[in-house]
Image (tube, helix red, strand yellow):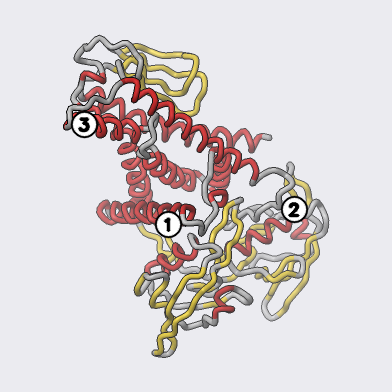
Amino acid sequence: MVSLLYYAIVFVIVLGAMIVIHEFGHFIVAKFFGVRVDVFSVGFGKRLWGVKRGDTDYRISLIPLGGYVKMAGENLGEEVTGAPDEFTSKPKWQRLCIAFAGPAMNVLTALAIPTALAMMHHEVPAYLDRPAIIKAVEPNSPAEKTGLQTGDLIVRIDGVENPEWRDIEDTVAVNPDQNIPLAVNRGGEVKQLALHVEGRPVDQEKIGYAGFKPEETRIVVKEVKPGEPAEAVGLKVGDQIIGVNGNRIEQSGYGIAEVVQAIKGSGGQPVTLTVKRGNETLDLRATPALTGDVWLLGFGLEVSGIEMVNQRLSLIAALKYSVDTNLRILDLTKTALSQVFVGKRSARDTLTGPVGIAQIVGQAAQRGPEQVIELMAILSLNLGIFNLLPIPVLDGGLIFMLLLESLLGVFGLPLTLRIKERMMQVGFVMLMLLMGFVIFNDISKRIPWRTAAPQTEQARPANK
């Protein structure tokens, strides 16, 4: 119960901060252009506390999910006097700047967070920027079934020439259950192959899995807690976990997720871990103990064998890294949404609403504050881009109506208040339908009668 409350608080802080930053963008540009701002509220609903400075009531409101800015004369149907400090009295280009300012603030935040983190601490796998030479192939994986072998150099994948491992991972991740063409250089001969990427459920979503790896990795025991079931059956630090309940597992983060799921979903029944210790292979059978409301064995796992680069980046290098990261996120998002529209991917497996975001934030909170801050950058970018959609009631809808009004003005045609109101009504209905779909989607993927998906939040050392 305490952990759920903690995750809820983190979720409110993360989402609220991103929305307040968005609204601050509108606020500061409106002030710059001399628009009267009546209210700057952190939260919605009933005013709890505030202070008035000049024309603006700076307040904290009851519902802590974001905030809003109320500018004089901005709402349709609101009585306007034609005063020079009203929103509608300003030139269209200034109103466009005010509308763009919110999304722009989110994008700037999405750039600033990775930049600052990279300047303080930048730890990434060394292989990401290296040529895609396959160092290991998982047994019975799509890669093995395709005929890929250790030592193959991937020279083309899905149209990308001479890809690095970062490109490979991105391409595979966004193409679950798809066939993608690739070419490999094997001993100087280029072979053309078709890889069927397997779809894997991860946190009620679906990502692609191929089964080839840039490094030979192992799942090893990082920690064994004294007095816990794992210690009682003789599990030791350094043991390599190769199977659970008789099933071989991948030597990757997904393999850790399989172990975690087997233990947490055991219901208190014994779990058999197959481990390698030196030249020995052992089967250790342990009964999980109930800790809080979770079944655990009391040990931690990590994926070893991955060379990491750990260094602080200069401002220019960190900014370049941040720009590249955000462009990659946008490209992956575009690819996934394009697949939805052409029928290659279901919207159900792609779109996430507030329930899903809350779960993701909770998982990030388990891994530590740095993960939460990184997630804030991703959410800020998505919030900024989403608000640019040309749907009335969003910033993009206001931008669209201002541009449409300017275009019609060229031909001497007005965009009447009645038409604007109808556009706003349609936009509101569209937004509510979208929100209803993603919330229903979130809940339907998490109701008890569905098969629980493996949890991947334990890829770093964690208590089992």
99 is higher (above) or lower (below) than 365: above
Q: Is residue 21 visible?
A: no
Q: Residue at x 74, y 47 (%)?
A: 449
Q: Is residue 185 visible?
A: yes
235 is higher (above) or lower (below) than 195: above
Residue type for callout 1: Thr
Q: Which residue is mark 1?
A: 335
Q: Earlier in the sequence, mark 1 or mark 2?
A: 2
Residue type for callout 3: Ser
| Disc 1 versus disc 2: nearer the observer | 1
How would you rate the neighbour count of disc 1 (Cα within 10 Å): few for under 14, some for 14-19, many for 20 or more?
Answer: some
Q: Which residue is mark 3?
A: 406
Q: Name the foreground residue: 15 vs 373.
A: 15
Q: CA distance from mark 1 to mark 2?
A: 34 Å
Q: Residue at x 30, y 31 (%)?
A: 401
Residue 293 % position (x, y):
74, 43
How would you rate the neighbour count of disc 3 (Cα within 10 Å): few for under 14, some for 14-19, many for 20 or more?
Answer: some
111 is higher (above) or lower (below) than 18: below
Secondary-structure class at tag 1: helix
Q: Name the foreground residue: 340 vs 216.
A: 340
Q: Name the foreground residue: 204 vs 238.
A: 204
